[in-house]
Amino acid sequence: MGDAILDKKYDGVVTVPFFKMESNYLLGKAKADNIPIVFLDTEIQLDHPSYFIRQNSHNAGKVAGRLLHGLVGNDGVYFVVNMVTERGLHANNLQRENGFREFFQTNFKDRDIPIITINHPIDRPFEINHEIENMFMDQRPKGIFVTNARSYLVPTILKAHKVSNVSVVGFDLHDDNLKCLKNKEINFLINQKPEFQGYTAIKGMFKFLTEKDASDLNMDVPVEIIVQENCNALWN
């Protein structure tokens, strides 16, 4: 794939670093051909210095922890839901979970707050096993953090298993998630502003190619929290 892209002799490339080996290969080839690359969405450690326009996924996970803790409290039980591809867990999902756990480990060192990870294959319908079903039946308040864009799947499962007293935080503002937010089935959505990332990357790339100025090719996009009261303008 990297060869196919670079054989086109583009002036610059904007992509995402979901797969480390392929990203390293693409980056190495691009540097040899003096083609600039800027990565979106996620920052990972690569073999060469790189440009990233992304949201800090670790910090986003800590924000999710703070939001859920404000609803669920110290006496609740927390779940992290990851959707896993055939290649494994994407780096940004893992970074978000680590940030989520760090929030609790840092702020509540003297308490044993349960955090349960659910890794579900992305190519299968979202379902839960008997063990997770029993955990959902726990009478304590429950908080669910979905580390990718599929938090809209959670309310259907909760309804099917008659699970109550649950708060949900997820990512991304596509229509299914926004509909659940508006219907109070999701409590918070974290916006990565993907359109802004793409626009900023192209604008920064143009500045780099015309002025040799790379100052706009590294950016940490702030964590934006969307709630029911401010989602109407975002939902088509």
Image: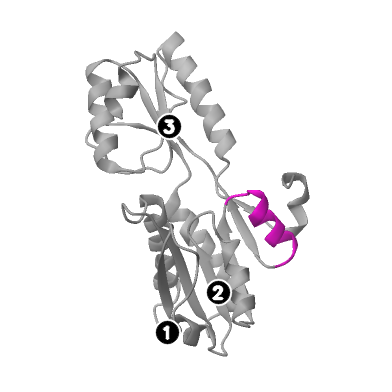
Residue range highlighted in magenta:
172-184
The residue lying at 29 percent from left, 28 percent from top is: 2
**Quick one: quadrant of the C terminus?**
top right
Residue 149 shows in the view: yes
Query: Three-letter amino acid code at disc 1?
Result: Glu
Query: Three-letter amino acid code at disc 3?
Result: Asn
Above or below 172: residue 82: below
Label 3 crowd (10 A; few <14 / some 14-19 / many >=20): some
Quick one: 91 or 130, which is closer to the camera? 130
Does the segment drawn in magenta span residue 5?
no
- In terms of sequence position, does the residue under pointer 2 or pointer 1 come before the other? 1
Q: Where residue 218 is drawn, which disc sits there? A: 3
Above or below 223: residue 21: above
Pointer 1 residue: 131
Pointer 2 residue: 143
221 left or right of 122 in image: right
